[in-house]
Amino acid sequence: MLATRDGTGSSDKASLRQRLRRRGRNLVDDVRRAARFPGAERERLLLIGKSALAATIAWFVANNLLGAPSATFAPFTALLMVQSTIQLSMQQSWYYVLAVSIGVSATAVLGPLLGIHPLTFLVLVLFTLLLGFWRRLGSQGTQVSVAAVFAYATYAQVGPGINAAIDVFIIAGLVVLGATVGVVVNMVLFPPTRYRSAQRAVDSLGDSLGYLIGDIGCRLWQGAPEPESTQDWTRRAQDLSGQVEQTSQALENAVESSRFNPRRLLTRQPETYSGGRTLFDMFQRCHDQLLSITRGLNYVGQESEIYDRDQREFLDGYAKVFVRCAQGLRHAGWMHDHDAREREQFERDVAMSEKRCRILAEQADRSGLDISGKSPIYGYLLADLQRMVSELENGRDEFGQDSNPSGRSR
């Protein structure tokens, strides 16, 4: 039994050492990536460094320079207020300071009124918990009770009197000090700007969307779609929905990180990033049409009838429009790096897509495929394709009103 226990203990220790070594290697790899490449690892390490610096500064000011009692409130607040963006730091600082002020004020009122008693503590906690539900405080509502509890502990330790009231309100002052230090450090020391990541996300979405549409077009050119192919297209189009959501979040992060950011003034980047949003909106709407088109093609691939010449010609024409749409989407995504040249190519692709779509509609009208003559699904496919081309045309027109689609000032 002892041998078994010793063996099990040795195995657990060896497993623990392996986990520690693996985590250590992962940490070293993260540090190396952060030093060499921009990304999540670098932002995470910067956030850790800024939090430590803000807490140290707040502690030094509160303890060494001011000699304030309960000086730990300042560095504790500074740690909390260093957020991923300046806007978030300012918002959370306001909510946190407001919540702490309410909690401290409640203690300052109920303490002298009810005295130092367990019943006073109960009433104080219940009252501040109710105040914490105030929607204006947001996620910091629970801090009302936390601040009240710490303030009451200070009040109970010092005892009733003017000194206790002063010490209680000093807590609120230390919280303001810590919040100020946290916001200032976050604003001055490498404030994040996420334009590059948003640009890469938009570019990648346009490239992925164009690649899938181009693949469908080339396969349609080769022959009638088979059920396996159309099901694969539907699945891949649905999978792109996740990338659409991620790109939307990247754009929101870029806009949020630019607000109150002094680096935006140095790099002359606009706050709204309208060019990236214009591109994304066009990609998103084209993706919506692609989802409908793949469902229609999936129905076509499952038809048991033999395709006649009109149906084959329709799919050939459809493939030509699809290939041009794919090229247009990919060139639109590349306009961040080569604005003038890629925009000209994008405009040519859109014009050619519109021309070929018009020819396809005339062909379908002559053959009767755009109505319920042979199969109504072809009319639906044509309508979805026309909407996609229309989205590309709208995007082209919006770019014409914006001299810089990347959203950057020249």
Image (cartoon, rainbow, N blue to C red):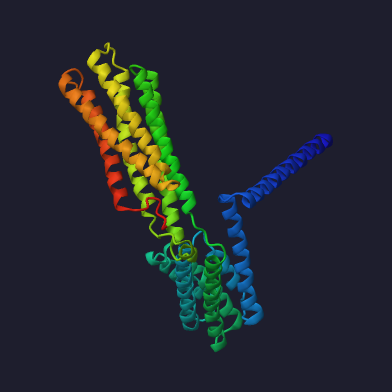
Callout count: 0
Q: Between 193 and 319, which is closer to the camera in this rendering?
A: 319
> Which corner quadrant holds the N terminus?
top right
Q: Quick check: 103 above or below 285?
A: below
| Residue name at image x 29 percent, y 21 percent | 315
Whether residue 142 is visible: no
Taking the image as shown, residue 96 lies to the left or right of residue 9, namely left
Q: Residue furthest bottom?
A: 162
Residue 51 image offset from top left, x and y in percent: 59, 63
Q: Is residue 309 above or below residue 67?
A: above
Task: From the viewer's perspective, tell me whether residue 26 is left or right of residue 329.
Answer: right
Residue placed at 60% from the left, 58% from the top?
46
Q: Residue at x 16, y 24 (%)?
A: 365
Quarter-of-image position of residue 16: top right
Q: Position of residue 44 (x, y in %)?
A: 58, 54
* Furthest residue in direction right, as rendered: 3
User: Residue 22: x, y in percent?
Assistant: 70, 42
Viewer-closest of 342 and 256:
342
Q: Quadrant of residue 157?
A: bottom right
- 71 and 203: which is toward the camera: 203
Quadrant that contains the C terminus: bottom left
- The residue positioned 56% from the left and 62% from the top of the image is 190
Question: x, y (%) of residue 254?
Answer: 44, 55
**Nearest to the observer: residue 296 or residue 107:** 296
Above-or-below relation of 290 to 152:
above
The reply to whether residue 159 is visible in this rendering is yes
Q: Is residue 158 left or right of residue 244?
A: right
